[in-house]
Amino acid sequence: MKILIVDDEPLAVRRLQRLLNHLGDYEVLTAHNGEQALIQVAKHHPQLVLMDIEMPVMDGMEAARLISEKHPQTAIAFLTAHEQFALPAFEVHAVDYLLKPVATKRLQQALDRVSEKQHARITIKDGGRLLSIAVDEVICLQAEDKYVTAHLSDCHYLLDQSLTELAQSYRQFIRIHRSWLINVHYLRGITSEGPHLSKALLKNTEIQPPISRRQLSEVKKYLQT
C-alpha cells in the first residue's frame, strides 16, 4: 500500500514513518501542508492519506475536500490532537479519525479498514446463482427499468442495489447521468456528439455512457488530475 503522511510537524512525520515501518512493508510519502498533499496525490496516487488538520498554507480539512472530489478512490484518515473536528472529518468521507499521539494498535485498525475497502466485493446475479466479484472489476453501472446492470470488460451482471446505494458504498463510482455511474479508474476521455450530447470514453469497453449537462463539468475535473 502507498501511504502519504501530511503533517507540518517533522517529529510527528518521523514517528508515523517508524510506526508504519514496524507494521508492514508500505511505500511512504510525505507532505507538510494541504497544497503539497494535493500535488503528491495527483502525482503518486496513494491508497491512503494520513492527514493532519491544523496546518499552514492549506489546512487538512480543505485539502481533504479537494482530494475527495478529484480522487475519490483515495482514502483519507485524519490525525489530530483535537476531538472537535470529528464531525466535519466524516462529512468529507474520511475512513477514520485518529487522535494524537497515535497508538500502534489504533493505526493498524485504520490500515485494516482501508485494506478491506480496497478488496471490496459486490454480490451479483448470474442466472439462479449469487456470485461475488471485485468492485474494481466493474467499469460502469446502468439503471434500466427495475434493474441495475454492472458492466465488466467481458460480461455484465444484474445487481440488487440501486445506483444511489452503490455510489454511497463505493467511492470509485461517480454519477454522470441519472441512469449511469462510472468507475473513475476506467475514465479515459469524453466525446461530444453535438452541443447537447456528451459521452464518457472508458477503458476496456466499447460502452459510451451519456453524460448529463449538469455532470459534465464534474467529469472533466477527473480528466484534469
Image (cartoon, helix red, strand yellow):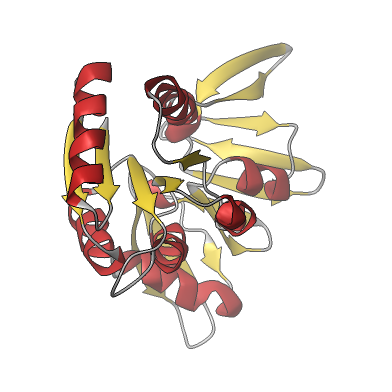
Q: Position of residue 150 (x, y in %)?
A: 58, 37
Q: Position of residue 167 (x, y in %)?
A: 62, 48
The quarter of the rendered structure image containing the N terminus is: top left
Residue 118, image quadrant: top left
| Residue at 33% in and 39% down | 47
Q: Is residue 147 left or right of residue 26?
A: right
The quarter of the rendered structure image containing the C terminus is: bottom left
Relative to 120, does residue 210 appear above or below in the rendering?
below
Of residues 184 and 149, the one drawn nearer to the viewer in this rendering: 184
Q: Is residue 92 left or right of residue 14?
A: right
Q: Is residue 10 left or right of residue 104?
A: left
Q: Position of residue 69 (x, y in %)?
A: 46, 63
| Residue at 25% in and 44% down | 12
- Residue at the extreme right: 146
Is residue 90 among what the camera can see?
Answer: yes
Of residues 170 and 146, the one drawn nearer to the viewer in this rendering: 170
